[in-house]
Structure formats: C-alpha cells, structure tokens
Amino acid sequence: MNEIANEFKSLRMPGMAQCWSSLLETRKIDELSFYEGLQLLLQAEKNQRKENRNTRLISAARFRYQVTIEELNFDAARGLERGKIMQMATGEYIKQGAPILITGATGTGKSWLGTALGYHACLMGQKVAYFNIQKLFETITLHRVEATLSKFFQKMANMDLLIIDDFGVKVMDGQQLLDFMELIEDRHGRKATIIMSQLAVADWYNVMLSNTTAADAILDRMVHTAYRFELKGDTMRKTKN
C-alpha cells in the first residue's frame, strides 16, 4: 500500500500522496467507495497545488511585510472603512484594471493596507509585484545597463497587480519620470496598480516637474479612475524603548 504513495510522489502528486497516507494511517480507506476515495485524492491534490502556487506568488511578489486583510485594524475614523476594504478584497478592481491610491502621513498604515491587498490578490491566484519607488528605479537602471529593460517593462506590464510604495519621497529626474510613465501607460485600463504615498494626491504634480507633459499624462491615467484611501490619525508604529 505504501508503494502507491511512492508512485504518487514520483508522479509529482504530493497532495494525493499525503491524502493516501493519511487514509491508511486512520484506517478509513476501507470505509470509502472507489468514487469517494478518488474524490478525496483529487481534492487533496487540487488543494496542494493551489497552496504551492500561492506560496510561489507570495514569494515572487517580495512584499515588505507579511499581512492579511484579516489582520487590518478597521477604523472608519482613520480611513480604514471595513466595507470599502472588503469591496477591494473581491478583486473587482483587478478585473477592471483600476488603480488604488493610498495616502497618509508616516505610520498611518499605508504600506500595511497595500500589502494586505497584494497578499490577498496572491491568494486569489494573481501575479503581484511590490516595489519601494527607489528600489524600482534602481532595478530599472540595472536592466538598462544590462540591455534587458524592454523585458522588464513587459514583465511588469503582465503583472495582474503592481504595488509601488513610498511614491513622492523625492522629485523624479527626467529619465525616471519617463520610465514611470511607461510603466503606467502599459498598465492603464488593463492591469491594476496600487500606489502608496505620504503626499496628498494634489501634491503629486510637484515631484514630477522635470517633465510637465509626462506628469499630466501620468496623473490623467492614475487619478480620475482610482479608488482612494486617505489614511488619518497618529502613527500606528510602536515606539521602541
């Protein structure tokens, strides 16, 4: 009987192998009909493959934090309305290719919220990429040097969800702004993007003054169709003693 579990493993069916071993250990194998046993084995394999895929997606996203939507502290006074966040959890914004803009002062939970939405998207089987804005530009520069920038832009264009944190920490130079515009242009109306920033959206133009035409194009594509979260209140970060 153990040979069957080994055969499942050799065929790369770990879910079936584990389920089969469990049925043997609990001696439930004889209580099941062939049809019932087959259903259990198939469901176990399906669950295992989904779990493996989710693990790969979460690892590939490279989130700064590990946080789920269930761990968020919902508080309408802080801008964390339960109903609005749960609406985002349906993933409809991803189907729409709509942006989400999350703004607020340091420590109000912008990265926490954006990461929770991204983590949830992974659990729904979506491909997600998370970047701090400075790390994003460093990555673009590296790909430009290696003459692989077009492949990187194509990869980002194909992501179901792109999350960009700390937008607006400093003014973008001309090339950075053009690169950022290309990322946004490739995703506009097709793929979802989440941007987190300490700056109010009304002040975003000020960090893109190196090319006002590009700035107008970016804001036009990001602002008008976006879902917005404006987080308020004191910092939620624990003060270290």
Image (cartoon, rainbow, N blue to C red):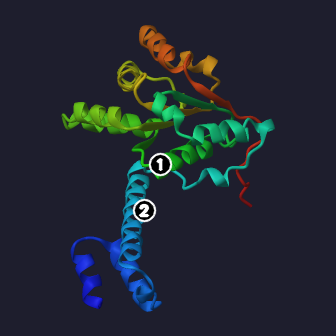
**In this image, 178 relative to 65: left or right?**
left
SS for callout 2: helix
> Could you say where residue 42 lies in the image, as x and y percent from the top left?
36, 68
**In this image, 178 relative to 231: left or right?**
left
The residue carrying pointer 2 sits among few (fewer than 14), some (14 to 19) or many (20 or more) residues within 10 Å by Cα, namely some
The quarter of the picture where the C terminus appears is bottom right
Rendered position, 5 above or below 109 = below
Residue 61 in view here: yes
Which residue is pictured at 37% across the width and 73% down the height? 35
Amino acid carrying label 2: it is Glu
Amino acid carrying label 1: it is Met
Q: Tell me the residue that label 1 is attached to.
A: 124
> Could you say where residue 148 lies in the image, as x and y percent from the top left?
21, 36
The quarter of the picture where the N terminus appears is bottom left
Nearest the eye: 70 or 201: 70
Q: Splitting the image into 4 quarters, where does residue 147 fall?
A: top left
**3D distance between C-alphas at marks 1 and 2:** 11 Å
> Could you say where residue 20 lies in the image, as x and y percent from the top left?
37, 81
The residue carrying pointer 1 sits among few (fewer than 14), some (14 to 19) or many (20 or more) residues within 10 Å by Cα, namely some
Q: Which residue in the rendered view is the most extreme toward the top?
A: 213
SS for callout 1: loop
Nearest the eye: 30 or 22: 30
Q: Splitting the image into 4 quarters, where does residue 139 fall?
A: top left
**In this image, 232 relative to 193: left or right?**
right
C-beta proximity under 8 Å, tags 1 and 2 = no
Residue 209 in view here: no
Nearer-N-terminus badge (1/2) = 2
Q: State the mark number for residue 51.
A: 2
Nearest the eye: 34 or 176: 34
Which residue is pictured at 46% across the width and 17% down the height? 218
Q: Splitting the image into 4 quarters, where does residue 180 fall?
A: top left
Q: State the mark number for residue 106.
A: none
